[in-house]
Amino acid sequence: MTDTAFQANPDNYCYRHPTRQSFVLCQRCLRTICPECQTQMPVGVICPECLAEQQKQQATVTRMPRRHAFSRGGAAARVSSSTPVVTYSIMGVTIFFYLLGLIPGFGDMLRSMLVFYLPLTYTQPWRLVTVTLVHQGIWHVALNMLALWALGRSLEPLLGRWRFLSLYLLSALGGSVLTALIAPTAVVAGASGAVWGLLGAMFVIGRHLGANVTAIAVILGLNLVITFLPGSNIAWQAHIGGGLVGALIGFIFARTRAVRQRRTQVWLLIAVAVGLFGLLAVPLFLYR
């Protein structure tokens, strides 16, 4: 599908605001809706029409007491899905674990249980993603969380929460897997692989949306140069692995936008995860 065909596809735009592109679908009618039209429900989001229909159905079953019907003009009862909840949650959990790591004695033990180290990963697979919770210092965690905040505010409302979370976790996994293939004895810490995945996905999705991705390309280039500077002590394998997987997932999201392709999208993400786990078997034969 060309960029022109992608932009001409009405499935890629909010049905109530035809000029606004979005990757989020109403969980009931499966129409595309922009952040302004999304109402967060216990599972997914719904559009204003489905919300009104649901409220009408509830009203016919039971009449709410008057004191419950009023809640600050309804604003408190409605949570906008444009708020990057997953982004803020990841930041909160990461900062929490960083602070735990500062506790004398306990912090060192906790960090040693979370970092990525291939020989231990086969019996402790959580290290493939918990590596994102361990950082080497205040600047390390601060820069990664700043990048996550900047990217997540744009990507999460565009993709939806579960897609964004899948992108983040699979990118982290991709960074760990490439490290396992190229540097099997390295000890790696940090969320940089996952952040690079967000950058890679934003670049690919931006291209498909017809957006100007020059700034993203410059940021990727500068980060790549910094990664390979002598004495930088940066796990470039995790960065490149996360970026490549993120770009792949961004491509999947961009090419499976139609409602009928929703199941295909899920299976492709599962295939990426299975493929990454399968690659972990390679070091067993190369480095034994």
Image: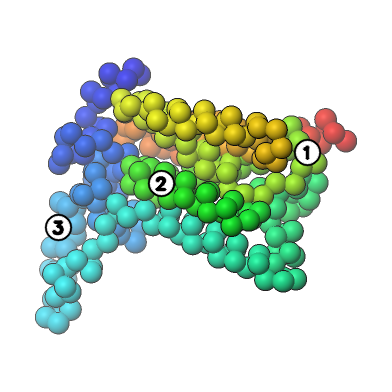
The answer to the question of whether label 1 and label 2 lie on touching residues, with beta carbons closer than 8 A, is no
Asked whether 134 or 244 is in front, the reply is: 134
Q: Residue at x 76, y 36 (%)?
A: 183
Q: Is residue 184 left or right of residue 288?
A: left
Alpha carbons under labels 1 and 2: distance apart: 32 Å
Task: Please report whichever mark, 2 or 3, sits nearer to the chain's N-terminal start.
Answer: 3
Please state the horizontal and vertical placement of residue 248, each as a whole percent of the image.
50, 30
Residue 124 lies, in percent from the top left, at 73, 54
Label for residue 52? 3
Q: Which residue is mark 2?
A: 150
Furthest toward the right, the residue is: 288
Query: Secondary structure under badge 1?
Result: loop
Question: Which element is circle 3 on?
Answer: helix
Image location of residue 87, percent across then percent down = 43, 53
Residue depicted at x 57% and y 30%: 224
Q: How many marks?
A: 3
**Dot 3 alpha-carbon crowd within 10 angstroms: few under 14, some 14 to 19, many 20 or more:** few
Task: Kindly identify the amino acid type of the residue bearing the numbered disc 1.
Answer: Pro
Q: Quadrant of residue 21?
A: top left
Residue picked out by circle 1: 184
Three-letter code for the amino acid on which mark 2 is drawn: Ala
The colour scheme used to paint the residues is rainbow
Marks 2 and 3, Cα distance to the nearest angstrom?
A: 33 Å
Image height of 138 relative to 218, above or below:
below
Amino acid tagged 3: Ala
Picture coordinates of residue 157, whole percent (x, y): 33, 47
Instruction: Compare marks 1 and 2 and give the one earlier in the sequence.
Output: 2
Residue at the location (16% across, 73% down)? Answer: 72
Report the side of 258 relative to 123 (left or right): left
Give the left or right position of residue 90, taking residue 43 as reference: right
